[in-house]
């Protein structure tokens, strides 16, 4: 301590460097005090506006979703005027479907599509396709469930699409297309085709088909039976018949991540405390985007965008509004400047000239 005092008194450079350091630390303290990250109560409308992944640019990443073996990861129950088709990578038919169709034992590409335009009942109802995607029994945990779009053809008169990627996890899919139940009227013929690898298309009977995806992508398309009647609604033209889980999913974090270059997530929402997690629901499929609703009542979360906190607490502003604290805070800056001038920019003393005798 004695050496520091001696250095302070004897070195003007040391005093100036110390002053610069004090100013820098003070500025940093003011900045940090004005931008203290805080938790936000969910749901938040302005946060949900950010929960959008653009076609070909971004993807939604659900980090460590709470999906037990056998639980739904995604589901779809088709309605009137809707066609659901799917294309799968690294997939096989399950054992029952293999025995029935004599195909699909080797992992490869599998597609399930409609064959031509299905018929309609007198009321206009059409065949209904149901798709259930579950975490397979014996599969490891899903580290991240990624949702995105890849096809630029999903325009206003085309289809709505979502690609599901569960990374290395094994997923089980059950899909079936059934005629509407309208009593004793003439039944609607629901024609669907299964294509396994490079094999010939197989016309399917009216029974569910089971498929196992071994760490591959699941590409789902949804079309209108009648192109003149769109399946999407509202000004955003979103299709909202596809559900995460059975209606929602719990996940450790929700991220919107760029698919073009590695950088901080454009949005990162996670529970306020470690292990809390957040809820994700209402998956919306647009022509050029995917959208989700984040959070439910009673949940709180910390939110970052491009590496910076979105919701902050301004301690300095709060202090300034308090008259008791504002007065000494307001006097601190002038006092600091006087101290710096005195110690770092001392006035030169006039030298006394000797008088003539």
Image (spheres, rainbow, N blue to C red):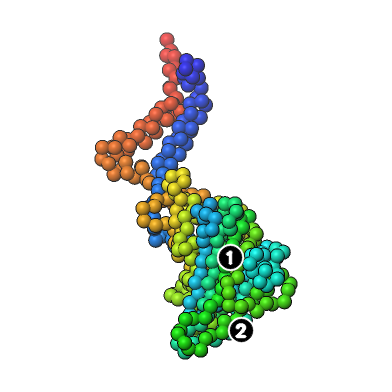
Mark 2 element type: loop
Above/below status of 285 relative to 185? above
Above/below status of 271 relative to 8? below
Place of residue 320 in the rendered image (x, y in percent of width and height, measured from the top left): 31, 42
Rendered image quadrant of residue 182: bottom left
Residue at 62% across / 73% down in the picture?
Answer: 112
Place of residue 328 in the rendered image (x, y in percent of width and height, measured from the top left): 30, 35
- Which quarter of the figure is the C terminus placed in? top left
The mark found on residue 173 in the picture is 1
Label 1 crowd bin: few (<14), some (14–19), many (20+), radius 10 Å: many
The residue to which callout 2 is attached is 116
Q: Nearer the viewer, mark 2 or mark 1?
A: 1
Label 2 crowd bin: few (<14), some (14–19), many (20+), radius 10 Å: few
Residue at 48% across / 26% down in the picture?
Answer: 15
Place of residue 298 in the rendered image (x, y in percent of width and height, measured from the top left): 36, 53
Real-space Cα distance between discs 2 and 1? 23 Å
Front one among 290 and 342? 290
Q: Examine the rendering and report whether any part of residue 244 can be seen.
A: yes
Furthest-top residue in this view: 357
Residue at 55% across / 64% down in the picture?
Answer: 133
Front one among 181 and 159? 181
């Amino acid at each position: 301590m004695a050496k520091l005092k001696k250095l302070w008194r004897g070195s003007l450079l040391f005093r100036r460097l110390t002053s610069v350091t004090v100013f820098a630390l003070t500025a940093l303290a003011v900045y940090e005090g004005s931008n203290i990250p805080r938790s936000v109560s969910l749901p938040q409308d302005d946060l949900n506006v950010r929960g959008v992944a653009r076609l070909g640019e971004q993807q939604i990443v659900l980090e460590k979703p709470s999906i037990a073996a056998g639980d739904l990861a995604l589901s779809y129950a088709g309605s009137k005027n809707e066609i659901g088709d799917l294309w799968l990578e690294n997939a096989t038919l399950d054992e029952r479907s293999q025995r029935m169709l004599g195909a699909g034992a080797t992992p490869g590409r599998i597609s399930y599509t409609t064959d031509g335009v299905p018929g309609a009942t007198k009321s206009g109802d059409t065949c209904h396709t149901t798709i259930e995607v579950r975490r397979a029994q014996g599969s490891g945990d899903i580290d991240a469930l990624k949702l995105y779009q890849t096809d630029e053809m999903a325009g206003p008169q085309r289809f709505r699409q979502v690609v599901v990627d569960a990374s290395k996890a094994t997923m089980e899919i059950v899909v079936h297309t059934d005629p509407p139940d309208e009593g004793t009227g003439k039944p609607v013929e629901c024609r669907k085709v299964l294509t396994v690898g490079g094999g010939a298309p197989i016309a399917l009977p009216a029974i569910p088909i089971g498929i196992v995806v071994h760490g591959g992508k699941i590409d789902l398309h949804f079309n209108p039976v009648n192109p003149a009647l769109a399946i999407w609604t509202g000004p955003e033209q979103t299709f909202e018949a596809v559900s995460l889980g059975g209606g929602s999913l719990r996940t450790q974090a929700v991220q919107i991540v760029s698919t073009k270059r590695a950088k901080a997530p454009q949005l990162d929402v996670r529970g306020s405390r470690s292990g809390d997690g957040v809820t994700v629901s209402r998956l919306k499929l647009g022509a050029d985007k995917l959208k989700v609703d984040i959070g439910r009542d009673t949940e709180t979360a910390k939110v970052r965008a491009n590496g910076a906190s979105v919701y902050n607490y301004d301690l300095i502003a709060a202090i300034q509004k308090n008259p008791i604290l504002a007065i000494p805070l307001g006097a601190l800056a002038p006092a600091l400047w006087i101290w710096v001038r005195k110690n770092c920019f001392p006035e030169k003393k006039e030298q006394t000239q000797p008088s003539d005798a």
